[in-house]
Amino acid sequence: MRFLLLCCLGLLAACHSLPPLPAWQSPEGREQAQLGQIVDLRSGARLSPAQLVERLAPAPRLLIGEQHDNPDHHALQQWLLQALATRRPPGALLLEMLEPAQQPRVDRVRAQLARDQWPVELPQALAWSKGWDWALYGPLVRQALARPEPLLAANLDRDEIARIYRAVPTLPGPAATAPAVREKLRRQIDESHCGQLPASQLPAMLAVQQQRDRRMAERLLAAPAPAVLLAGGFHVRRDLGVPLHLADLGAAAGLQVLQLAEVGAPVNAAQADFVWYTPAQPQQDHCAALGQRAR
């Protein structure tokens, strides 16, 4: 089943020129009325896909949050990038999934593609991390590599993360370092590790999370505009993630945040500007599995 493109008369031309929307892939929540809705969280208005594209297109910096294991989020990201390309000039695409050490490999592959030469084994050519499911990310990466704008790493290298663990650095700026922000992130980190992290490790884990967000913000500022960042939903949240770091760097103007969220997930105006609801992946009790392994 495909999404219905409900276009008002003033947007008919725009609708006709947009690529077709992808079919749903995830199995859960298909009966819910919220499925497929796009909401402007500031006004509460429901938007068509074409209206969303028109509102996102002017943004010099666009953050799109995903749930990493949801194939519908990856398909919608591809659709959005294709749709935005019809509305604005090339800029840059940044991925949380790429580390700085991979950037020379990405650039070499793009140089090969300029000569119409695709690597036989693209994941190996990019040194793609097995932690990011290539079956989900591969189509988007292939699409991005073939486009004129650069594809840029937005994460930390592993040796940088190791240094943060050894010595937690000071993070400048009042927005990202506000006590309420740090406490929310600390709770999220603790919950995501099922409450089993030693308390002594939480400061370093929090520092890694925030240094990742700071790196993404810095890379966005250095990238050609208009720039798009694809990252996990927590990284792009206005109240916790990259937008706070952009504010601390004096570059919050013109930013738009779109969360791709599974039906039923709470998303509010403090977290994002827009939300697009998709079907959900089956819920997994990671903490139960962790407990069984421990026993």
Image (cartoon, rainbow, N blue to C red):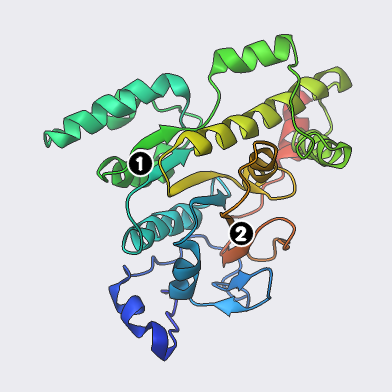
Above or below residue 277? Residue 294 is above
Which residue position holds label 1? 141
Question: 238 above or below 127?
Answer: below
Q: Residue at x 74, y 27 (%)?
A: 172
**How far across and how far down the image is residue 40, in percent?**
62, 71
For numbered disc 1, what is the local secondary structure? helix
- Badges 1 and 2: C-beta atoms under 8 Å apart? no
User: Is residue 174 shown to the viewer in this render?
Assistant: yes
Tell me the kind of residue under disc 2.
Ala
Q: Quadrant of the N terminus?
A: bottom left
Residue density around tag 2, few if under 14, some if 14–19, many if 20 or more, within 10 Å = many
Compared with 130, 40 (above or below) is: below
**In the depicted view, which residue is nearer to us: 8 or 75?**
8
CA–CA distance in space, label 1 to label 2: 21 Å
The foreground one among 31 and 129 is 129
Residue at 72% x, 44% y: name it: 285
Crowdedness near tag 1: few (<14), some (14–19) or many (≥20) residues, C-alpha within 10 Å: some
Left or right: residue 238 compared with residue 1: right
178 lies above or below 20: above
Is residue 127 in sight in this rendering? Answer: no
Q: Amino acid at mark 1?
A: Val
Given the current orientation, which residue lies at the most extreme front position?
Answer: 250
Residue 67 in picture, x, y percent from top left: 58, 49
Name the residue tied to disc 2. Answer: 261
Q: Which is more N-terminal, label 2 or label 1?
A: 1
